[in-house]
Image (spheres, rainbow, N blue to C red):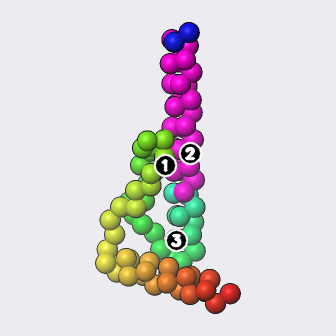
Amino acid sequence: MIHDLARAERIRYERRQEAAYRAGQEAVTNLQAALALAGLALPSLSNDGPVGCRGLVRLGGCSTDLANQLAEVIAAGAHALQDR
């Protein structure tokens, strides 16, 4: 009985890990698409895999020019949302 419970828990953990990995992949895809709409790309953007059953996206490094452009796009989007 204890062995079955441990196996069941391991299966649930593996499923949560897989779901977290898929969520990370989806987040990367969504962010890449949004950045592309703004004409931007983060060169090191990637799925960093599940950590503690949570998806983790690695944004990576970028130039200061790209960081400033990204800040402008985010600020403009935030202002547009506030003006609704």
Q: Is residue 6 magenta?
A: yes
Magenta-drawn segment: 3-27
Q: Point out residue 22 in the picture as x, y percentages from the top left corner.
A: 56, 45
Q: Between disc 3 and disc 1, whose residue precedes?
A: 3
Secondary element under disc 2, as helix, strand or loop, is helix
As shown in the figure, which amino acid type bears the numbered disc 2? Answer: Arg
As shown in the figure, which amino acid type bears the numbered disc 3? Answer: Leu
**Residue 35 horizontal side relative to residue 62, left or right:** right
Q: Are marks 3 and 2 in contact (CB under 8 Å)?
A: no
Quarter of the rendering occupied by the N terminus: top right
- In the rendered image of this protein, does residue 70 appear above or below residue 24? below
Between residues 13 and 69, which one lies in front from this camera angle? Answer: 13
Q: Nearer the viewer, mark 1 or mark 2?
A: 1
Q: Main secondary structure of the magenta part?
A: helix
C-alpha gap between disc 3 and disc 2: 20 Å
Secondary element under disc 3, as helix, strand or loop, is helix
Secondary element under disc 1, as helix, strand or loop, is loop
As shown in the figure, which amino acid type bears the numbered disc 1? Answer: Gly
Q: Determine which residue is flagged by label 3.
A: 35
